[in-house]
Amino acid sequence: HRHLTGIEGLQPHEIMFLLDEAERWIMPNAEHAAPDKRLAGLTQINAFFENSTRTLLSFEIAGKRLGADVVNMHAAQSSVKKGETLIDTAMTLNAMRADVIVIRHMSSGAVRLIADKVDCPVLNAGDGRHEHPTQALLDALTIRRRRGAIAHQRVVICGDLLHSRVARSNILALTALAAEVRVCAPTTLMPPAIERMGVTAFTDFDAALEGADVVMMLRLQTERMSGGYVPSPREYRLRYGLTPERLARAKPDALVMHPGPMNRGIEIDSSVADHAERSAITEQVAMGVAVRMACLDVLTRRARGVEGWA
Ligand code: CP
């Protein structure tokens, strides 16, 4: 693979290979005394056409830890605001001889479009409702470390599935790795025919939670609901919020996850999100840096004359 535009198309052994590669970059295992600057001399451009805290910062930190020269392009301060097209923007980045480009865009498929036009590897940092592959990898790594395995874990993904690229990428990764995936949403936020992705669909959150090993909550993405049905926060919390009472239906040691940013008091209560033993939310962020270091390393191997994918 020249690019990482999605989990779709990756074989289970390729997903596992990326998780194994990420393990070596997890602090405090990483050898900070003798830093590994394997991306020294390479230019990494992070082109973000949509807001981000975790993904942008962790890609920046990941590139810098490996010695790359990292440049961030924020669309709000770029010539995109003057009407420059996506293709022209991509050709401009290409002409600057980037060695790797990381892109977030509000349109599904925009990252693929750019990947087809440029000469260097492209990593998808989230495109519309389509995919967020590094999020799924960091979630899979978190599950594997905290639960000891991914196969046969009962993972419940609950919330705004209709607008969620995080859910799509996670479903693709977790089903490929033989987890039992349950999805739960109100019918208005459930994508049609989602069962075809190999998951079991629920509208009753209490029923979905029975025996869960992992509960992954999604943010209500009201910014993507223009013209559609927007649930009232109070009503939503009542039926789909992860409260301590509801979490009691899952296994006693079930893991709580959320990709962030969270709507506290809507899809997740603070007492659950901040639970010392159960919540893996800050660990997910830490795994994000390790996973992005691995992806930057693996995707630039061919250009550095090193053997690439497994
Ligand atoms: N999880 C995630 O993608 O967060 P950001 O939007 O802050 O990058």
Image (cartoon, rainbow, N blue to C red):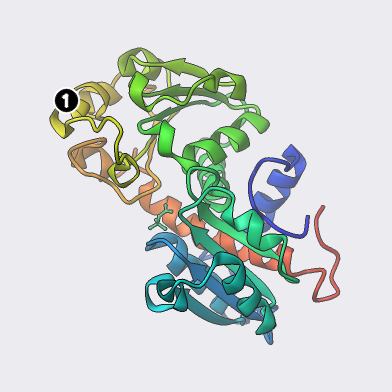
Q: Nearer the viewer, residue 140 or 190?
A: 190
Residue 141 as seen in the image, left or right of residue 13: left
Residue visible at 35% across and 31% down in the picture: 159
**Looking at the rendering, in which quadrant would you find the N terminus?**
bottom right
Q: Residue furthest bottom?
A: 41
Please say whether residue 26 is visible from this viewpoint.
no
Residue 303 coordinates in the image, percent (x, y): 80, 74
Considering only vertical position in the picture, is 280 above or below 21?
A: above
Residue 195 coordinates in the image, percent (x, y): 55, 18
Q: Quadrant of ligand 1?
A: bottom left
Quadrant in which residue 217 is drawn: top left
How busy is the neighbourhood of tag 1: few (under 14 within 10 Å), some, or many (20 plus)? Answer: few
Residue 57 as seen in the image, left or right of residue 116: left
Residue 300 coordinates in the image, percent (x, y): 74, 69
Please say whether residue 308 is visible from this viewpoint.
yes
Considering only vertical position in the picture, is 210 above or below 18?
A: above
Residue visible at 17% across and 34% down in the picture: 233
What amino acid does circle 1 point to? Answer: Glu
Residue 76 as seen in the image, left or right of residue 101: left
Residue 23 as seen in the image, left or right of residue 257: right
Q: Nearer the viewer, residue 25 or 98?
A: 98
Residue 83 coordinates in the image, percent (x, y): 45, 71
- What residue does disc 1 label? 235
Q: Residue furthest left?
A: 234
Quadrant in which residue 297 is drawn: bottom right
Residue visible at 37% across and 53% down in the picture: 282
Considering only vertical position in the picture, is 284 above or below 189?
A: below
Q: Nearer the viewer, residue 269 or 263?
A: 263
Considering only vertical position in the picture, is 220 above or below 54?
A: above
Residue visible at 59% across and 50% down in the picture: 109
Secondary structure under tag 1 reads helix
